[in-house]
Amino acid sequence: MFPYRQYQWESGMLQPIPPASQTNGPFVVAYQFSDVTGDGIADGIFLIATKLNDSPLLNNMSLVVQNGFTHEISVYHLKKVAGYNPTIWTGDLTGDRVDDILVTVQSGGSGAIVYAYVFSFISGKLGKIFDSIKFHEDRQYEVKYGNFAEVVVTSRNPNMRYILNIQYKGKEYLDEIYNGNGKLKEPIEGWVDPISGIYPIDLAGDGKYSLLTMEQIAGRYHADSLGFVENVLNWNGLAFESVRQQVAINGASF
C-alpha cells in the first residue's frame, strides 16, 4: 500500500507530490495492477481518498483505473463511503476470463460491517455490479426467539428457515429470558447485520471465483452473536445470486 502519500496525474501517469506541496487532498490508499480491461496488458487500479490529519478515517473515496495500454482514466466515485483499512482484490468473478475488482472498506462501527463493491468493465465502461449494503437490504431476514431455548432464523431470497438451539448460552443467559418451564418471559426478536466478511473463493479450481459472504446473527444486542448467515454468490450474467446458503452457529467448549 502507498503510505498515505498524495499523488496526482501527470503526463498520463500517477506521480507523487513532493511532501512540501502536499495538502489534505486525495491520497492513494490502496492499489493493484491487473488486466481488468481484457486487452492482455496490466492496468493500474487505485483507491483514492482523503483523511483528516488527526484521524485514520478515510472518506471521499473514488476508484480510479488507468488503462495500461491507452493510459485512459476511468473513475467511479464511492459516494457516502467512509471507513478504514481499504483493500483491492482482482480476479475473475463473472466468468469471462477477465479480472474484476473487489473493493472492501471497514466501517469501524458496531457489528464490524464492511462496505464491499465489485466493479467490472462492461462494453468498455467501468461499472459497479455488486453493492454489499444493497445485497443485505434485498435479503429480508427475521430472527425470533422461541420457547425451550430455540431461535428461528428466516431468510427471504432464498427462502430458508433455520432453528438454532441456544442452550450453549448458559444458565444465567437463559434464566434472564425464560421462565422455569422453558417459556419465554416476553417476545424477543434479533436481527441479521449487513455483511461483515466477504471472500473470493475458487470452488471448482478453474480460475472463476465465487463470493462467500458472512452476516452476523445478533440476538438481544450486537455483541450477543448467535452465529452467521453464509451465502455463496455466483454471477448469473445480470447479478450475483445466492447458490448456497447455510448458517454457521457458535459452538460451546466441553
Image (tube, rainbow, N blue to C red):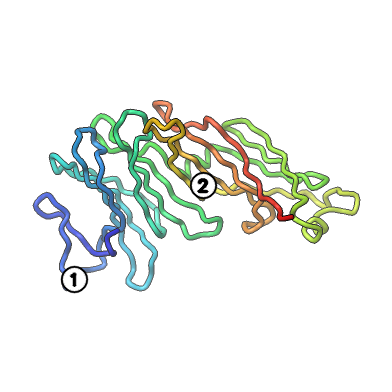
User: Quick one: label 2, few (<14), some, or many (20+) residues within 10 Å?
Assistant: many
Query: Secondary structure under badge 1?
Result: helix
Q: Is residue 120 left or right of residue 111?
A: left
- Under mark 1, the amino acid is Pro
Rendered residue at 68%/52% (across/down) = 219
Q: Going by the picture, which residue comes out furthest to the right?
A: 181
Q: Is residue 100 left or right of residue 66?
A: right
Rendered residue at 29%/48% (across/down) = 63
Query: Secondary structure under badge 2?
Result: strand
User: Badges 1 and 2: C-beta atoms under 8 Å apart?
Assistant: no
Quarter placement of the N terminus: bottom left
- Under mark 2, the amino acid is Ile
Tag 1 residue: 19
Quarter placement of the C terminus: bottom right
Residue 31 in percent (x, y) is at 28, 52
Residue 135 in percent (x, y) is at 49, 39
Q: Quadrant of residue 30?
A: bottom left
Tag 2 residue: 195
Q: Is residue 81 left or right of residue 182?
A: left
Q: Quadrant of residue 36?
A: top left
Residue 62 in percent (x, y) is at 30, 51
